[in-house]
Amino acid sequence: MNRFEYLRPQSVAEAVAAAAVPGSAFLAAGTNLLDLMKIGVARPQRLIDLKDLPDLDIIEQLPDGAVRIGAQLRNAELAHDPDFRQRFPIVAEALLSGASAQLRNVATVGGNLIQRTRCAYFQDPASACNRRAPGSGCDARGGDTRQHAVLGWSEDCIATHPSDFCVPLAALGAMVEIEGPAGRREVALTDFHLLPGNTPERETALGQGELVTALRLPPAAAGFARHARYVKLRERTSFAFAVVSAAAALRIVDGRIQEARLALGGVAARPWRAEEAEASLRGATPGAEAFHRAAALALEGARPSGDNEFKIELARRIALRALTLAAAGTPDRLPALPASPFAPLPGGLHV
């Protein structure tokens, strides 16, 4: 690990000013950043610890019905908040399927958004990686591509974004609040993570010195609470990242789908919102025919980035499973194995 300067600002303004210096990095819980520093992938010259910043770890009910979530709130605290879990069960289920209980107790909401890819070639300093060293190449191309992208990838990068939390956030239309040298702004979560193109080193919409301060779920997001599920297929149920996942949310009125939301995880460099699939479901009767059509549309344009063509059909089936479970209704109790396609229902509370 290289030597670095360590700062503990007392306000957001102070943190943003400190991060204006090139080579700076924000430290929240460090569950991703510190690991990358230890293996030599991340080498910040200045580390700005955010733990002393006030009022960034609370859940706020806003006057218009939206919910604002501070970026320093721990993942476990959000998932287990009774009111939040009742209004946004799909988000709680995704959170409880991610990492281990120990990590969820430490990791923060904001850190989850900006976590780096788990691509083995990115995490190996001896491998060529355009994300880590622009212009060096991509050793993942032609390598082990089981975990890599089938949507939105480029010849320069085929990595995927690892977050579970971000998948239902994308489906529900979450907004990211950002504070930076030029002031405050907000970005839709679907635009926050960038596809690689020919600049894979640019992973998010954040500029130099910008800090994620909060997430905001719009008032309409709570309207999906009765029919919303997150399904995640992984190589080990305990704490592995998704091979593929899907968040499905439906608003059903008089036996027809009034509104639908669908997003996929593990398939691209960002959570993949399937808007054409959503549009195909509006006005449809919930059932196999409509859900098969939507799942096919969600993967339209998908192509393997190596030896991972299986992920396309797998993602279709996970999308179909998520839609089917959502139509059946959100269970009163979260499954004992949140988001697992093998979890018996209704299961027990995962608390």
Image (tube, rainbow, N blue to C red):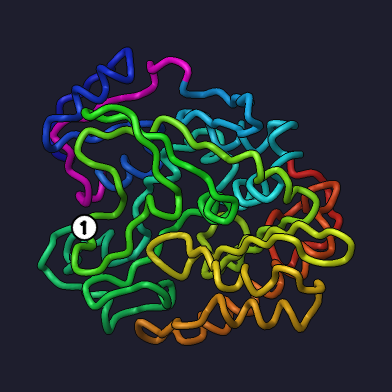
Quarter of the figure with the N terminus: top left
Residue 29 on image: x %, y %: 41, 33
Residue at the limit of the structure toward the top, as seen here = 10
Q: Residue at x 51, y 24 (%)?
A: 57
Q: Residue at x 50, y 60 (%)?
A: 241
**262 lies left or right of 216:** right
The image shows residue 83, relative to residue 153, as above or below, that is above
Which region shows up in magenta? 38-55
Residue pointed to by mark 1: 201
Residue 209 on image: x %, y %: 22, 33
Q: Examine the image and state in which quarter residue 208 appears.
A: top left
The image shows residue 199, relative to residue 148, as above or below, that is above
Residue at the limit of the structure toward the front, as seen here = 283
Closest to the observer, 337 or 327: 327
Closest to the observer, 259 or 4: 259
Residue 317 on image: x %, y %: 65, 79
Q: Examine the image and state in which quarter residue 201 appears.
A: bottom left
**231 lies left or right of 71:** right
| Magenta residue check for 77 | no
Q: Residue at x 65, y 46 (%)?
A: 221
Closest to the observer, 263 or 27: 263
Predominant SS along the magenta part:
loop
Amino acid type assigned to the residue bearing label 1 in the image: Glu
Residue 115 on image: x %, y %: 38, 48
